Amino acid sequence: MLSGDKLQNLNVLAAQWVAPTIDYHGLAPELVVAGGLCLVLILDLFMDERKKWLLSVISSFTLLAAMIPVLTLALSDVQVRSMFDGRYVVDNFSLVMKGLFLLSGYVVILLSSSHVEEGEYWRGEYWFLLLSSLLGMLMMTSSRDLVSIFVALEFLSIPAYMLAAWRKRDTKSNEAGVKYFMLGVFASAVMLYGMSLLYGVTNSTLLVDIAAQVTGTGEFSAVHALAVVFVVVGFAFKVSAVPFHTWAPDTYEGAPAPVTAFLSVASKAAGFVAIVVLVYTAFPLAQDIWQPFFWVLSALTMTVGNILALKQHNIVRMIAYSSISQGGFVLMPLAVAGMSGSANSALRSVVLYMIIYATTNLGVFAVILAVSRKTRSGEISSFGGLFSYAPALGVMMTLFMASLAGIPPLGGWIAKFVAFQSLLSSQSSWAYALAIIGAVNSVIAFGYYGNVMREIWMRPVPDGDITQIKIPGSLALALGITSVATLVFGIFPAVGLHFADLAEIAGALSR
Amino acid sequence: MNMLQENNWLLSVGTFLPMVGVVLMMLMPKAQDQSVKLVALITSIATLAVGIYTAFKFDFDQAEKMQFVANEKWISVIKSSYLIGVDGISLPLYLLSMVITLLVVIYSLDHVPSPGKPKAFFSLLLVLQTGMAGTFIAQDLILFFVFFELVLLPMFFMIGVWGGEQRQYASIKFFLYTMFGSALMLVAFLALFFKTGAESFSIPYLIENGGSIGKNLQIWIFAGMFVGFAVKVPMFPFHTWLPDAHTQAPTQGSVILAAVLLKLGTYGFVRIALPILPSAAREWAPYIGGLAVIGIIYGALGCLAQTDMKRLIAFSSVAHMGFVMLGISTLTSFGINAAMFGMVAHGLITGMLFFVAGSVKERYHTLEISKISGMLTQMPHLGWIFGFCTMASLGLPGLAGFWGEFPAILSAYNPGAGLNETVFRVFMVIAALGTVLAAAYLLWLYQRIAFGTPKNSGHDSHSTHDELHDVTTYEWVAWTPLLIGILVLGIVPNLLFSVFDPAVQVTLSAFGG
């Protein structure tokens, strides 16, 4: 029961409250996606079963439509739109990432449509969940407050748990969903604990305030360190950094292939977005805490991911470990991001790596989906002799594998190169040590990427079955987009760097 | 550094023209093997024509300067640009790559190795050509790195798809070795970039500023580059990929590997490592020289132990590249000139030897030396050509091989300033011993294969008779230019030395003359 006094106080507060001005232009991408997902949900209820293919069309158009405000925002004169007292910010960083999420979401829809049509599962929910998760990612790019980051994280994760378990009569898919869910919730708990500590010591949830508080005194207590590490660990689960990666291979293998593509690209990128935002806006001067942490995380992630990938026979598991290892390269420049002069290039490197990795990895999944339509197998050996009966697919898979391995002139090399460059720009001996670990790892990685190429080009076709692969139109489109982009990013690196060259994240303390 | 910028479109056209051919081939329907071959032939002829035109336009009186320089924006964010140009060091190698590719294409018109797929085969050949030519013209470290790596994948597939029995093993070994080297090389490039003030990746800029880096650091950066280039050369103890790759590669792959790819490593030393990091080079020189002579002796002993003709030639490559590296390690203009000559000569001679080995394999269906004999009586032309090449390879005066080997040994007598004379004179003696061993294994090889009475190596006599046809027209067309080149360069070595020398002098200016 509220006493009279308090009630009065509340009344006064309520009278003082002014509705925040909402910049509808700034929120337009989120609003479009939100509208689209409601439409999909409602239509799904009333639509005739045979017409449900329309839902995929609506979903993909939703994402393309959401790209329009992203473009107009990018072209508008207002550089930074800050809403809700700086808790929700639209700046160039968030726009680039929104563009990446929308486009990779679009490609995932292209990958999914024939897969979803041919399965005997609930289609409407699939599109609805996918769009919800994407909406969470869009929110993540703009969140600059612990609460909104947490909400965005749950918004993008919970639909993803359900998507992973979407083939509900398949025990592997169930396992994928449950594992993902359990570890995800655990990670959230750790992160929330860190956040509560942060709130406890800084008395604010706004990242900029936290930055001022954490770094204002210039001294860190154990609580600060614990808080920073716990929050980062929460997201390390999301990006499947070693030793928080154990969910990834099982989830990737069990989930439907397009969902795996989505998880390994978009969901992972969202984790990196959160890490970057936190590091740059909440703990910019706490580098003594997070630099060594990222150093170890990065070295472990790329090495362990690589070594485990070498042993895989299943292509999706192999890609799962490969994506863990690639995550190590994304984290690499963060190990020096606190040093003067390296912050900018580290941000550039992380963004560029995510753009190129997303492109290439989606391409890999497009090929896997196309090939498994014929072979109905997930073994790497099912790619045997692919070049002899499906040369185009064989060449594309070769390009994607080479790009992941970082071989010029394909996209992956510039991503790796910029990561190394940023790392070494700090010129510290720790950076050189990590660079050499990275260099050795990029060689080891060729062991398994090269193995796929070897299957495609040099091994016989399993069972001599050389029936042609029929590629549905949407899959062909996805293949075309990803392979052209992989080549363009590699040969004209300036294209990718144009998007990645962001001065800063708005609201960050300048160093 | 002075740069001449006229006709700066020439090099780009020459380098990327093969890619046009690749695109054309890609667009062709699968079945049209003949037109695929035609496109490949026309493309490589056109490429060489552009190359020859470049040579005509090249101002030989100013061979020390970069010519046809183009400098376009490429990746401005990371301060790398599309900076290309050739001087007296690059031009001969640039042309060599074009000549070899054309000859290999001609040879392949008649000899697409099993399992066929001419479209893919010729496409890879042409991609390879772009990578090789690009490496020789790149004047920016990142551009250099991209081209340097561009050759890896085509070669990987060429060995892995069209190679011999152990091809998959050989191809992956080749790839992992070279990639390991280039990964460390890239780290070294980046360190160099930051230590020179993070201004530019352009090689001329780095040559001007690299000397200011502290000596200890230079030594470390040099180490990274050393691994990258030494794997490619290949120097002892990084050579173990080479015998496997050569033995398993199809003839065409072996020829290109020997004639051009190995030169990417030695070229890297001369173009990048030495002039940019002179003090480190001086520290490293005795070790490089030491590894080079070990390579010479080890390669020669390896040759004596081989029973497979192709493997023997591969080991002889290790020995010959040892002479090239010995010349480089003296840090004198005499030695580097010899090394440059040795690169071209080895390209022509060993390329030719691998062609012959390919033809032997095709006719006898084996490369086991013990199963072949009496080639001179069965196929006199092939036998004489083979004899000519072995003579050239062992360094007979009057043929090209001599001018690479002999001056390299001689140069070790008087190494550059600051190097220990005694050590290098010991190297000289050992290297000279190596030539004796070279004569031994090559003459022994020739004796076992060409002399004696023919054997009917296992299979029945009727078919043998048909298969043992002498040199075919395609082979003549592909081989004659190489044979003429070996002879002409042997008689008039100054043709090349006069082109190299001015540029070598400039390279050495970093060492104070």
Image: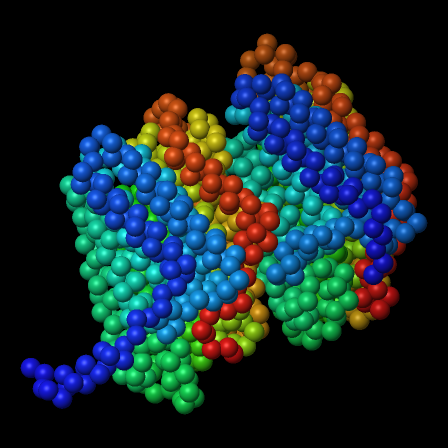
Res B284 → quadrant: bottom right
**Outermost residue toward the left in this view:** A1
Residue at x-position 77% and y-position 43%: B9
Looking at the picture, tell me which residue is in the foreground, B487 or B222: B222
Residue A283 in view (yes/no): yes
Residue at x-position 42% and y-position 34%: A476
Q: Is residue A329 left or right of residue A375?
A: right
Q: How is the image coloured?
A: rainbow
Q: Is residue B110 left or right of residue B323?
A: left
| Residue A351 point in image, percent of width and height | 47, 60
Residue at x-position 90% and y-position 47%: B60
Above-or-below relation of B276 to B430 = below
| Residue A137 point in image, percent of width and height | 34, 58
Looking at the picture, tell me which residue is in the foreground, B312 or B4: B4
| Residue A468 point in image, percent of width and height | 39, 24
Residue A315 in view (yes/no): no
**Outermost residue toward the top in this view:** B462
**Outermost residue toward the front in this view:** A15
| Residue B182 point in image, percent of width and height | 59, 55
Res B304 → quadrant: top right
* Number of marks present in the image shown: 0
Residue at x-position 86% and y-position 54%: B64
Q: Quadrant of the N terminus of chain A?
A: bottom left
Above-or-below relation of A503 to B186 = below
Above-or-below relation of A32 to A90 = above
